[in-house]
Image (cartoon, coloured by chain):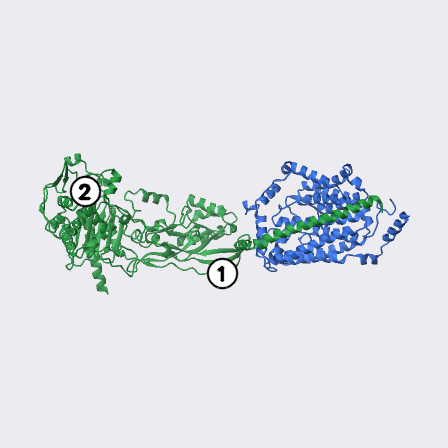
Amino acid sequence: MGYFKDRNCYMKDYNLSFLDKIRNFNYLYLFLVSLVVFIGIGVLYSVGSSTSSPWQWASRQSMRFVLSLVILLLISLTNLRLWMKYAYWIYGMALLLLIGVEVLGRVHMGAQRWLNLGFFQLQPSEVMKIALVLALAKYFHGASLEQIRSVKFMIPPVLMMGIPVLLILKQPDLGTAMMLVFMSFGVFFLVGVQIWKFVVLALMGIGSFPIIWSLLHEYQKKRVLTFLNPESDPLGAGYHISQSKITLGSGGFWGKGFMQGTQTRLNFIPEKQTDFIFTVFAEEFGFLGSLILFGIYTLIIGYGFVISARCQNFFGKVLAAGLTINFALYLFINSGMVMGLMPVVGVPLPLMSYGGTAMITLFISFGLMECVDINREMVIGRLGSIDDE
Amino acid sequence: MSVWKYEKTHTIQKRLMALSGVFLCVVFVLLARLFFLQILQGEKFLLLAEKNRISLRLTPPERGRIYDRNGIVLAENKKTFQAVLVKEESPDFEKTLDLFARLVPLSDEEKERIIKEVKRKRAFMPVRVKDNLTPKEVVLIQLNAPDLQGIQIEEGLIRTYPQHEIETHTAGYVSLFLDSDTKDKDDPLLNLPGYRIGRSGVEKAKEEVLRGAPGSKKTEVNAAGRSVRLLEKNKSIPGQDLTLTVDNRLQKYALDLFEDNSGAAILMDVKTGELRTLVSAPSFDANLFLAPISTKDWNKLSSNKKNPMQNKALYGTYSPGSIFKLVVSLAGLENNIISANTTINCDGYTQLGEQRFHCWKRQGHGKLNLIQALEHSCDVYFYEVSQKIGAEKILEMAHKLGFGEVTGIDLENEKSGFVPSFEWKKKRFNDAWRMGDTLNLSIGQGFLTATPLQIVRAVAAIANGGYLVQPHVIEKKNYPQGLPLFNPKNLSVVRQGMFDVVNKEGATAYGSRFNINGMKMAGKTATTQVRRISAEERKKGLKDQKLIPWEHRDHALFAGFAPTNNPKYAVVVVVEHGIGGARSAAPIASKLLKKALELDIEDKEEK
């Protein structure tokens, strides 16, 4: 009977040996990811070389890379089933951390985003990016298409997204909130929610724009307005956008050369080592370099979807797709922002921007991606065990 | 595979493909944007990036000096110390400024300006607090340096006029470039703190020549505007030095001759048009405007009814009065309407219809020929001959002698005076030109006005053999020799008349004659009414001019030349409200000419 055949099949998967895992490990994917990190460290050195301590950012970023690599390897070797089992717990903890930020979080640059753990500043919104994907993946894993298509069934996942989004908006961190919403909608789309529902939602969103506008902070409104017309205030709030465009544009086709970017070296770009690092790269390596960089990023995203597509279990599929969407959103929002296509919302360029939490959370998600890929032939029952169908 | 899985898996595979497609499109849009920014607009942004990066600082050029014909300095630059304030080096710049003001007096207006400027400029940019510091002030500031953090003393150059008031209307003066200046408003050199531009005289007329070209310092600056490194340095090119034709000794002498009077004196080389003297009295110290002029000084200057700021030699227009009789004579002679022997009997007036035109001598001159008429300045003689000559020919002669248009002197603000015409009168008064107008014209009263400069040029033409020279104050190598415009015979008749005016006993300017080694002066006096004399006043008899208010008294003019046998200089003197040409203008002209001739002899002996 089919039942037993199936059972034998995933019984075999379940016992992947360490060697099997090493063999299944996706080295090309890790290579692509590491390549971007190396490019990023190079750019950080270039940025640092215009200051008195050239290594100040590059060396710390390298150390984080090593630490992140270890985390990636450890996670990739875990059992995927465990992640499904504890998905809701992880989500719950992330939610608690977010609330913790509200209570204990310290004010940093006008926004409450960090939780000081003494040796390390934890950014719960970053953790939430992964936790939400895990929770959604688990939620949709056991569902049937019929269920997914019912409005009632969609209430819990919408709440799962909505509660952290509201908390993060309150911090306020428009960029992360936007990413969580887009990522969740991406997942909803992938698991089969009807397209007309998105259309209705979009129309409702446009309708409620005035309400959202009134809820935005003054500086957020200003950012949006100056985004729409940066030339109106080139030395004030539009400064970021104008200078960012000048920096990118002046790179031309070939770029000004490594460590030759005048705009960044002379400090015309604020936060050049973090959110605006792409401008540094584009100024020094030109359109050609940017084309190559985007090529690598596109390969990483494409590979992410391949990992999702070839995974045999639904949890892994959704997890891999969700994390990939997350990664892509980082890239799109950041580059759209520095190119003047989007308001400045404070989203870093994945793998390149200087910053601890972003790097570590990204590598946790790449670890999970590897874990999904290693266990791509694993079959997971409706409730997570072998025989719960 | 179970059903719950199959359908779902089918959907997700399809939708993964769709999402990949969407993401590819996003990547494409981003690359298109990058292409637009980096390739299509790359040049533009590169330019903007360079503009960000490079700061051009100008170093002002040294302004050209101005000398008189003998090399005496009229305008030069002296080293000066100026105090500047650098905000970022002062813990509290307003307090520093208060302390500074206790050592070196600062007006409230200045303080306000400094505070405004400091707030507007970047923290490391120096702002001028006070320039032209005295050595004492410099020492005082240095001694108190610990309390004056942020105050620095810079060395620079400032214009100075060692001749003070003597050359104000020739060399001119400079003053600070102001926000209200519209010409070259955006020239970065002019906008340097403390930059001064020419406001009058040669300083203004030859601003471009004197200015020179600024040097520049190209530096790379960071976003805060601070210099990071020097890229390029160009030296400034100093302005050209200028030598004037005026003789400072004569200038000083002429100005002194005016005492308290207001007026103008010009002494011109009749052959070249070089001005040896060009003064306008009263004058004022050219150094007054170097620092922003104080309100008190300004009020004193601008409310003075003798108008020291106006260059009356170029800008004042006067009725030429009896001097114009020279023009009428020449018009009659050149057109063969009168001759030296044309005789008229003066009864003290000419009757024209109902109107009676009086001679200045009520009892009349009796019989006179042309030369005698000039000698005694008989009005009736010219009333009579002008009727024969006709206004048309007189006006034509006036134009020929350069009246009614600017002389083209190398100074600014020259006025053109005015020569009327029949059409003008028709248009202005809706009335035809009448014989009465001709009579008024014949004695230089009425509509016609001229500047002293035009008068001296016309006299020079009579003296030099009949050509108009180009008056100028800046030394030139070549003088275009004009073509003689008149019959030499006719000119000598007029010159004879002018000679008699000064040298014949009983003639109008006999008191001003001189004789140095046989060199004598010729000329013509004029006394012109400032106010029309009413019939009532005439009936009462002319009041003693000294009893009427100063501004109603007649102008006194004298124009002449010397030496009479071989004319070298032409002179004109205007004494505003000086009552009589012979009384106040002729003596000044005479002394000035005499002095010029004496100086020439002295200079020759020295050589």
Instruction: Give SS at disc 2.
Output: helix
The image quadrant where one finds the C terminus of chain B is bottom left
In this structure image, what is the colour of chain B? Answer: green
Q: The blue chain is which one?
A: A
Position of residue A109 in the picture relative to residue A133 (left or right): left
Q: Residue flagged by tag 1: what amino acid is it?
A: Glu
Residue nearest the observer in this picture, B498 or A382:
A382
Mark 1 or mark 2, which is nearer the start of the sequence? 1
Residue beneath label 2, please?
B440
Marking on residue B456: none
Residue B254 lies, with reference to residue A228, above or below; the image says below
Q: Residue flagged by tag 2: what amino acid is it?
A: Asn
Position of residue A55 in the picture relative to residue B69 (left or right): right
Q: Where is residue A44 in the image (x, y as percent from the top left)?
A: 64, 56
Q: Position of residue B520 (x, y in %)?
A: 16, 56
Residue beneath label 1, please?
B232
Residue nearest the observer in this picture, A62 or A294:
A294
Q: Would you say the residues marked 2 and 1 are in contact, meaning their CB atoms lie under 8 Å apart?
A: no
Q: Position of residue A316 (x, y in %)?
A: 79, 49
Position of residue B380 in the picture relative to residue B307 (left or right): left
